[in-house]
Image: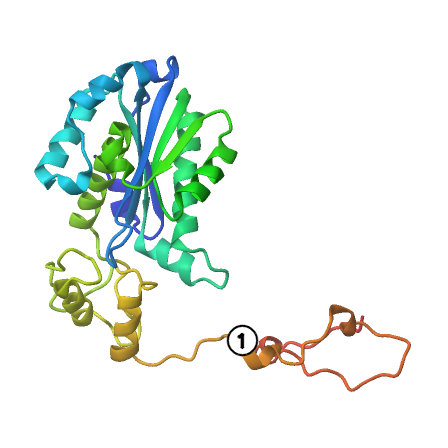
Amino acid sequence: MDLGELERDNTGRCRLSSPVPVVCRKEPCVVGVDEAGRGPVLGPMVYAICYCPLSRLADLEALKVADSKTLSESERDRLFAKMEEDGDFVGWALDVLSPNLISTSMLGRVKYNLNSLSHDTATGLIQYALDQGVKISQVFVDTVGMPETYQQRLQQCFPGIKVTVKAKADALYPAVSAASICAKVARDQAVRNWQFVETLQDFDADYGSGYPNDPKTKAWLRKHVEPVFGFPQFVRFSWRTAQAILEKEAEGVMWEDSSAGDQEGAGRITSYFLSEGPQTCPRAPHRYFLERGLEPATTL
């Protein structure tokens, strides 16, 4: 798997895919959707789809694909290599979301939470397969959030496709198991070959599992926190574990943010226009304008 694009720029997202087998453009196909790395505070989150014709589903099952969490790294690598060898009927696509993208999405002025990001990424991969000519008839998805709501949303996006969203789908449906293997292999490789653009003193490559409750991961975060700039981009700043360490170990920062008091006394929208009635004292400008030295150029 070539993750060179991510290694050259690991600040955003990158999409990888296999060639689309000819048979997948001719026969109805089943698609499995799963992710790897949703919970860790370190490294990217990877979404994957894996698809094959319904007529070859038994061949996919014969590969002994299973939930990636139940397999060793060597078993996952072997199964992924086998799927690559069987590229005449199995195809896949990945979307690798960097920690930086996840953090900026969740911490932006307009919040974009992890569930929404996950849903949109899964939807985008299914649409990508359709755009590549894959003849999709069924989609199986490992749930994020409430399965009924998620399934309804996907069904609305793809009304001509039968969509099934279930918890533990990676253990129930071979196509989802295969997708989970693709996602996990990609994430493991991305984490293993991560290119740190920051200069880290006494760099320690042993950061454990990357999960917030792992003592090794917590120790690594405390060791590599920078008082002003925080963590390397390998870290998801939006995770509570990272935020707690920043609050304790890093310098305090006063962020530009509207306090509750800024909204007190805010009137109706019509109050900002002149009326023919008695004029009241002009309202003080919002702090946003005061801090930037902005004044009205004209009167409405």
Q: Mark 1: few, some, or many residues within 10 Å (few <14, many ≥20)?
A: few
Q: How many marks?
A: 1
Q: Is residue 41 above or below residue 222?
A: above
Residue 226: where, in percent of width, then height? 24, 73
Task: Identify which amino acid the numbered label 1 is placed on.
Answer: Ser
Which residue is tagged 1?
258
Residue 28: where, in percent of width, then height? 38, 17
Name the quarter where the N terminus is drawn: top left
Q: Residue at x 27, y 76 (%)?
A: 227
> Residue 112 falls in which quadrant of the image?
bottom left
Does 37 sit left or right of 29 as displayed?
Answer: left
Q: Is residue 81 above or below residue 253?
A: above
Q: Residue at x 45, y 26 (%)?
A: 161
Residue 56: where, in percent of width, then height? 26, 16
Q: Give the camera-side residue of 192 and 199.
A: 192
Q: Residue at x 63, y 78 (%)?
A: 286
Q: Is residue 158 above or below residue 46?
A: above
Residue 172: where, in percent of width, then height? 25, 33
Does 39 sit left or right of 140 as displayed?
Answer: left
Q: Residue at x 39, y 42 (%)?
A: 147
Name the quarter where the C terminus is drawn: bottom right
Q: Secondary structure at mark 1?
A: loop
Residue situated furthest bottom in the rendering: 281
